[in-house]
Amino acid sequence: MLNALAIDIRPPLAAVVAAKSALVVWPVLPLERAMRGETTFGEPGAEASAEELMTAVAQRRDRKAFVRLFETFGPRVKAYLIRQGADRASAEDLAQDVMLTVWRRAAQFDRSKAAVSTWVFTIARNRRIDTLRRARRPEIDPEDPALVPEPDDPADRVVEAAQRSKCLHAAVAALPEEQARLLRLAYFEDKSHSVIAEELALPLGTVKSRLRLAMGKLRTALETME
Amino acid sequence: MMPEHHPGDDLLIAYAAGSQDEPVALVVATHLALCPRCRNEVERLEDLGGVLLEELEAEALGEDSLECVLGRLDEAAPEAPEPPARVPASVDPRVPRPLRDYLGAGLEKLDWTSYRGLDKAELLQEVPGFRTRLMRIKSGTAMPAHTHEGTELTLVLAGGFSDEHGHFLRGDVAEADAATDHRPVADPGEDCLCLAVTDAPLRLTGPFGRLLNPFLRI
């Protein structure tokens, strides 16, 4: 990368830069440090998004960046597993496993497709179905010739995955409490909607229509940003 | 051609959340293979899962948790379990994955039973509380009018059928519950091939249950 820069800079400018750098002590920029394999991720006060941390893990196997991700997501994955019915000891073991998978599969993370939180959620969810439910999860195969392809080019989508998540955070916060609570139950308790309806002493139709209402609001929020 | 009848939001939410039983998830996932619109919806619902995960109150990890994981970063990843044998797409191009993986040696090798223009083959018999069937209805055949005890989800894979609720073609999902009294008629032309999942009530066992079953199971 440094070589490429040297070639790109035309001789007169390169000469100026060379002359200047001989006299002035340049501040060490984060980019230069990153190129030397150092990062500021482990230092207090350094602001890096989860997506930047994940990219650092994927491209440079950056352990400091991984520690930051571990501290953010590990305890939440554990909380998720406890709510799904795991006892504390297995929730701890599984949360460690999930974070180890995040490290191992880092190269598969695609920030244009998903936010880090989405990606960690799907890893934790699938691990839970494997171990707590002992079931197979039927999933599509993007390479299957029988799959009906997307009519438009996904590259046309302008909104970044992380932005979408930010927008969803705000939209969830704006939901009426009963709808937000129902969404959390639907995502965190491994129960069918009819069992949830029974526990809340609501007709199943009411549970379904509240979920539909909530989805409608979240959809509108996402559409207005696009 | 895009499907026009999609699974309801509650089914897509339960799929993204991973709270469905395998037969229902199989209908949803096979619909996703045929429906880019719902694939996109499920991606957004997974984003929502991530957002809700981030909002969860943290549960402190064990003191040695981080150290333990850091110590394992350089370990070789465990060998992935042997994936189940895949049925090549050429066996039946009408059946996309994941359903194709449940067909064993292929559609024609299933254990079909036939009765008056309707062929049925049972899948996923090991999952209690559900009947998962592939159905082949001879073109132009009318099924007898029926209601359901539970919910029936039908995904069309080939051909089509009509009932009081509409016209269903490849990729479409029809949802029928106890209140639905319908009389599906297969389209003329190609035979109608579909995947149908019913959350049938659990079969009663024991001496009295066995006596009662012939009356309960129609």
Image (cartoon, grey):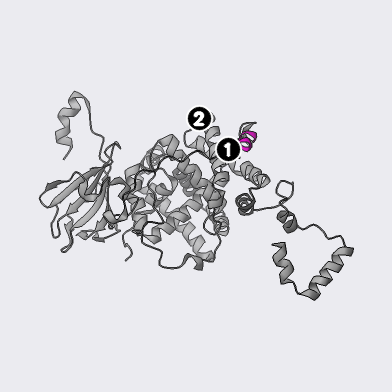
Residue at numbered disc 1:
B75
Q: Are marks 1 and 2 on the same chain?
A: no
Residue B181 appears anywhere in the view:
no
Note whether A4 is above or below B133 in the view shown. Answer: below
For residue B4, side relative to residue B50 (left or right): left
The magenta segment: B67-72
Quadrant in the rendering for residue A26: bottom right
Q: Secondary structure at mark 2?
A: loop
Residue linked to disc 2: A87
Residue B49 image point, x, y percent: 50, 48
Seen at 47% across and 43% down, the residue is: A125
Q: Nearer the viewer, residue A178 or A149?
A: A149
**Residue kind at label 1, given as amino acid type:** Glu
Residue density around tag 2, few if under 14, some if 14–19, many if 20 or more, within 10 Å: few
Question: In the rendered view, would you say A116 is above or below B64?
Answer: below
Element under label 1? loop
